[in-house]
Amino acid sequence: MRAALIQMTSGDDPAANRAVVLDHLRRAAEAGADLALTPEVTNCVATSRDRQNAVLTSETDDPLLAAVQAEAARLGLWVLLGSIAVKTGDADGRFANRSILVGADGGIAARYDKIHMFDVAVTDTETHRESAGFRPGTQAVVADTPFARLGLTICYDLRFPHLHRALAKAGAQIITVPAAFTPPTGRAHWEVLLRARAIETGCFVLAPAQTGDHPITEGRPRRTHGHSLAVTPWGEVLADAGTDPGLTIVDMDLSDVDAARARIPALTHDRPFDGP
């Protein structure tokens, strides 16, 4: 199968982000992709809660999702919206960070709400409290497509190997990791964690990323690491998109999943243990 990783520098203007996504989807289809994948918070990278409340909508009313559904159907292309930020109607006003898989018929094939919240102090001057604005999901998701079974994750989920192992044991052949990694953590951990998750699960890993300095109209600046990656089930890097926005095409042979798992069948070697 052929996948197209879309690397973006989304800002807090959803209409501008939508135009970029649609252009990349057309280019992905022209390149013969079966599946195109966008990064985390494709529709809006914002650092102001007021701005989010002003421009975000519910999933039902999200203009980017509607446009992607229509374009996917027109192009006959599967699309993973790595995630979009959507209003939930929760009493506390928190949003959902939601990955949505759109089929080639334009229908929604799967949804996944990010489980692990990025509540960290990256440096003395950079802190993130994702749980203040987003509610965590509770359900792991594996989705069937005509070309592979996908296990869905988002960004900070990458640091929780038990989630990825559960997805692989549920039949995932490809794990998707759309992200908006910070530059400090990206430089230190991004590639090694993606390769580790691929090796541990015997899955292909596809990780479309946000990159660069984001156009923010309200709130503090935001910068992300880039380097969208595709990794084989043996832990080899198939493609690294660097730091420029754009499209990266990768070809995958799904028989590599079975081959890697046959060489090291760790997914079948779990044993009970006590403690610690």
Image (cartoon, rainbow, N blue to C red):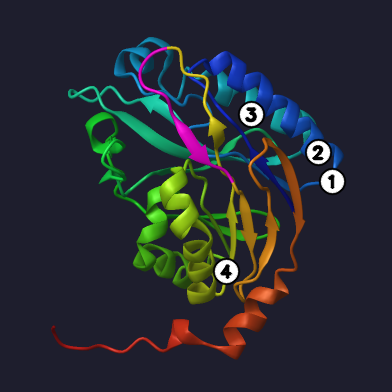
Is residue 112 at least partly visible in the picture? yes
Mark 1 — residue? 32
Residue at (68, 48) in percent of width and height: 241
Depth order, front residue of 35/123: 123
Q: Please identify, in this view, whether the residue under mark 2 or under mark 3 is nearer the observer.
A: 2
Residue at (45, 72) in percent of width and height: 169
**Residue 244 belongs to magenta span:** no
Circle 1 Cα neighbour tier, 10 Å, few/some/many (<14 / 14–19 / ≥20) = some
Amino acid of disc 3: Gln
Magenta stretch, main secondary structure class:
loop
Whichever of callouts 3 and 1 sits on the residue coming sooner in the sequence is: 1
Mark 3 — residue? 69
Amino acid of disc 4: Cys
Taking 217 as reference, is 129 above or below it?
A: below
Q: Which residues are magenta?
A: 218-226
Q: Position of residue 102 (x, y in %)?
A: 60, 38
Taking 181 as reference, is 200 above or below it?
A: below
Q: Please identify, in this view, whether the residue under mark 3 or under mark 1 is nearer the observer.
A: 1
Mark 4 — residue? 203
Mark 2 — residue? 29
Q: CA distance from mark 4 to mark 3?
A: 27 Å
